[in-house]
């Protein structure tokens, strides 16, 4: 009814009542997946604070791979931690590469290299890219005094609902439903191009394996 009246609903994650746990976080990614299943849209666009899905280049990742192999790779360890930020605080954006495409099988499972999969599950790469880009922006601006409230808002934010790995999983399932799926940075020309169904340089596109 909302759509029929020409209105655009704006969804966001929120705390909701839960029959199992009493209360939980309903992710905006989960909402988009349900909307895709019900409405069967032509395309679904994920807007984030980075250009898409990144992986750390192999030449730089050799030491990290051993570190990652020592971790428990349970899906419950997907979220970035303060340790991840500290470990990557001395890296630069040239050490990372944007994954232009992610292939998805018929079951909606992303087909990713082992190392890239580990990096996504532990949140290392996206956290680092976000911090690097935020730092690059701040260097171009004249420093301004901040209130305590502003300082609190400027701290690195972590997505408690799964971060980039959650988006990759949901995007892959949407792709398997026959939807054109892109992850890109919100508020940019690339975001507008993606909405219009046009290819853009700074984005990750999800592609069915049989294509």
Image (cartoon, rainbow, N blue to C red):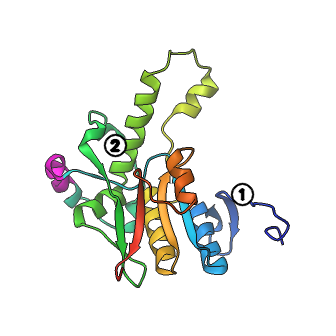
Residue drawn 56% across and 66% down? 44
Residue shown at 80% from the left, 61% from the top: 7
* Quadrant of image for the N terminus: bottom right
Q: Is residue 59 magenta?
A: yes
Image-based side of 52 in relation to 93, left or right: right
Residue at image coords 35%, 64%: 101
Q: Position of residue 73 (x, y in %)?
A: 30, 65
Q: Which mark is residue 115?
A: none
The 10 Å Cα crowd at callout 1, few under 14, some 14 to 19, many 20 or more, is few
Q: Which mark is residue 83?
A: 2
Give the residue drawn at x 50%, y 15%: 142
Identify the main secondary structure in magenta: helix
Identify the image quadrant of residue 89.
Answer: top left
Q: Is residue 151 above or below residue 193?
A: above
Mark 2 Cα-neighbour bin, 10 Å: few <14, some 14–19, many ≥20: few
Q: Nearer the viewer, mark 1 or mark 2?
A: 1
Q: Say above or below: 158 vs 138.
A: below
Q: Earlier in the sequence, mark 1 or mark 2?
A: 1
Queried whether the magenta region covers residue 102, the answer comes back as: no
The residue singled out by tag 1 in the image is: 10
Instruction: Look at the image and give the residue range highlighted in magenta.
Output: 58-67
Element class at badge 2: helix
- Reply above or below: 137 against 108: above
């Amino acid at each position: 009814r909302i759509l029929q009246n020409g209105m655009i609903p704006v969804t966001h994650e929120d705390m909701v009542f839960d029959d199992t746990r009493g209360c939980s976080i309903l992710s905006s990614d989960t909402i988009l997946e349900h909307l895709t299943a019900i409405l069967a849209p032509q395309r679904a666009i994920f807007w984030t604070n980075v250009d898409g899905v990144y992986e750390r280049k192999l030449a730089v990742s050799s030491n990290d791979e051993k570190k990652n192999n020592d971790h428990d790779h349970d899906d419950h360890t997907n979220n970035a931690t303060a340790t991840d930020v500290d470990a990557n605080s001395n890296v630069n954006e040239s050490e990372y590469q944007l994954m232009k495409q992610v292939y998805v099988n018929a079951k909606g499972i992303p087909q990713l290299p082992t190392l890239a999969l580990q990096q996504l599950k532990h949140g290392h790469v996206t956290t680092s890219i976000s911090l690097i880009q935020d730092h690059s922006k701040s260097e171009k601006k004249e420093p301004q005094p901040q209130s305590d409230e502003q300082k609190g808002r400027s701290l690195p934010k972590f997505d408690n609902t799964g971060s980039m790995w959650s988006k990759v999983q949901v995007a892959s399932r949407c792709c398997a439903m026959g939807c054109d799926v892109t992850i890109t940075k919100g508020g940019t020309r690339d975001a507008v191009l993606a909405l219009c169904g046009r290819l853009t340089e700074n984005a990750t596109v999800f592609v069915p394996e049989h294509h």
